[in-house]
Image (cartoon, rainbow, N blue to C red):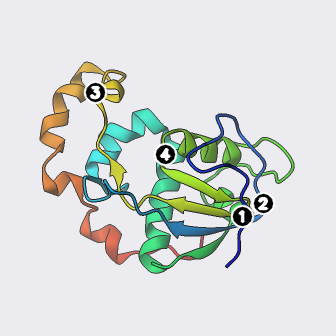
Amino acid sequence: MQHYLVHSEGTQPSTPQRWPSQVWLEPWSKPDALQGCDPRSLYAERIWLPLLGPSALWLARLFAWKLDAYPDGTWLDLEETANGLGLSYRAAGPSSMSRTLARCLQFAVIERRALNCVAARRQLPLASTKHLAHLPAATRAEHPTLLSPACLRAPLEHARILPTHI
């Protein structure tokens, strides 16, 4: 598949941008991929939800489900995806979907490799000290407990239910 690059390697936009109606979703292999948490895990819900926001975390979870079902990648209709997440989508302007994608780019949950290609992490990184400082004290205190392997993995019921229709 051929893509048309819109950013030089290693750069990510800081503002919402235009998105085509369909993008190719592929896995993003990172060296730290084994040191992290599944976006469907308890760790992601307790730690990443207040940092990313609900729309971005749900989108990261959707990407994980899609990549479980299609490990080599798949086409994703952004309007249909936005509607499935309760977000607005406009191809020619700002929308809640474009802001959610921008938030995912900002936190390196996804990488835009081309105009019509997005790579998504299968694992979110563990939160840095900087990120933890933004969380409420009670959540920071809970963090060591959430580092257990059971809290970093997706619950088994998520692995059995793959929403491939969105």
Label pair 1/4, CB-CB below 8 angstroms: no
- Residue under label 1: 116
Q: Earlier in the sequence, mark 3 or mark 1?
A: 1
Which residue corresponds to the image point at 36% horizontal and 28% vertical from the top-left?
Answer: 131
Establish if 3 lies above or below 34. below
- Residue under label 3: 129
How many numbered tags mark residues here? 4
Q: CA distance from mark 4 to mark 3?
A: 16 Å
The tag on residue 108 is 4
Q: Is 59 in front, or is 29?
A: 29
Q: CA distance from mark 4 to mark 2?
A: 20 Å
Q: CA distance from mark 3 to mark 2?
A: 36 Å
Give the SS element for disc 4.
Answer: loop
Would you say 8 lies left or right of 35 here? Answer: right
Label pair 2/1, CB-CB below 8 angstroms: yes
Question: Which is more foreground, mark 4 or mark 2?
Answer: 4
Q: Where in the figure is residue 59, as x and y percent of width and height?
A: 53, 54
Q: CA distance from mark 1 to mark 4?
A: 17 Å
Q: Earlier in the sequence, mark 4 or mark 3?
A: 4
Would you say 41 lies left or right of 3 here? Answer: left
Give the SS element for disc 2.
Answer: loop
Q: Where in the figure is residue 61, as x and y percent of width and height?
A: 45, 58
Q: Amino acid at mark 2?
A: Pro
Which residue corresponds to the image point at 48% horizontal and 49% vertical from the top-left?
Answer: 109
- Residue under label 2: 20
Q: CA distance from mark 3 to mark 1?
A: 34 Å
Q: For label 2, count other residues whose C-alpha is less than 10 Å away and answer few (under 14), some (14-19) or many (20+).
A: some
The tag on residue 34 is none
Q: Where in the figure is residue 100, as x and y percent of width and height?
A: 61, 44
